[in-house]
Image: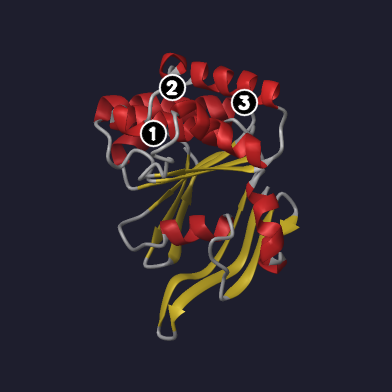
Amino acid sequence: MIQLYGVTKAYQKDSSALNDITLKIDKGEFVYITGPSGAGKSTLMRLLYGAERPSRGQILVDGQNITRLPSSRLPFLRRRMGIVFQDFKLLVRRSVFENVAFPLEVQGRQRFEISKKVYQILKLVGLEHKLQRLPLELSGGEQQRVAIARALVVDPSVLLADEPTGNLDPEVTLEIMELFKVANARGSTVLLATHSREMMHHFPRRTIALEAGRLVGDITP
């Protein structure tokens, strides 16, 4: 599903954010990417959805070499992915429904299909009663659930989440993690970048550890 071969990302000549990373993640896995601040977690995520290009090495996602993919094809790659950010990145002037519907509109889906799928996914995350609210009318945990719903509505083959619970309290974090478990059970390969040892303790999964841009651990419980 996801393969990296000797991937290095350098922003400056004498400094690499990632250094010679080789790893494989199988279809349907749930994997943590962990490490201290500056370890390279976010850089790795950005490489996987094409926001950055590696300085060296190859990246394959679902059999497609994205390092050779022209920029014009990147939007088509991302349509098969779900991406969840720590700061949500919701459209603040659009309702909950409109935020979740947006990726389906980009795909050119029919209006009746969009309405059905959006309602179903909002029900899954427990927000079907707030579909006309604006993001700023919601709590932080609710905004993150909207962001997860937006990622899940396209039935992604790969779900990437970069510190998705970093600003949330422990109780809400547990609720959000349950949603990622549901996404994984629905067939998505999940990669979740985090430095939360408590979360990894509560939900043990394969853990890939980075430190100073290098792969220093790969443990399956």
Residue 107 location in percent, x, y? Answer: 69, 40
- Name above or below for residue 68 compared with residue 45: below
Tell which tag, 1 or 2, sits nearer the viewer. Answer: 2
Give the alpha-carbon distance from disc 1 to disc 2, as whole Å: 16 Å
Tell which tag, 1 or 3, sits nearer the viewer. Answer: 1
Give the alpha-carbon distance from disc 1 to disc 3, as whole Å: 19 Å
Marked residue nearer the N-terminal end (1 or 3): 1
Residue at figure coordinates x 71%, y 38% from the top left: 108
Residue at figure coordinates x 43%, y 57% from the top left: 42
Which residue lies under the disc numbered 1? 144
Q: Inspect the image, locate mark 3, and give the three-letter code of the amino acid beneath it.
A: Arg
- Name above or below for residue 157 compared with residue 184: below
Which residue extends farthest bottom? 13
> Residue 132 got which mark?
2
Marked residue nearer the N-terminal end (1 or 2): 2
Residue 134 location in percent, x, y? Answer: 38, 29
Q: Nearer the viewer, residue 110 or 23?
A: 110
Marked residue nearer the N-terminal end (2 or 3): 2
Q: Inspect the image, locate mark 1, and give the three-letter code of the amino acid beneath it.
A: Gln
Which residue lies under the disc numbered 3? 186
Q: Inspect the image, locate mark 2, and give the three-letter code of the amino acid beneath it.
A: Gln
Tell which tag, 2 or 3, sits nearer the viewer. Answer: 2
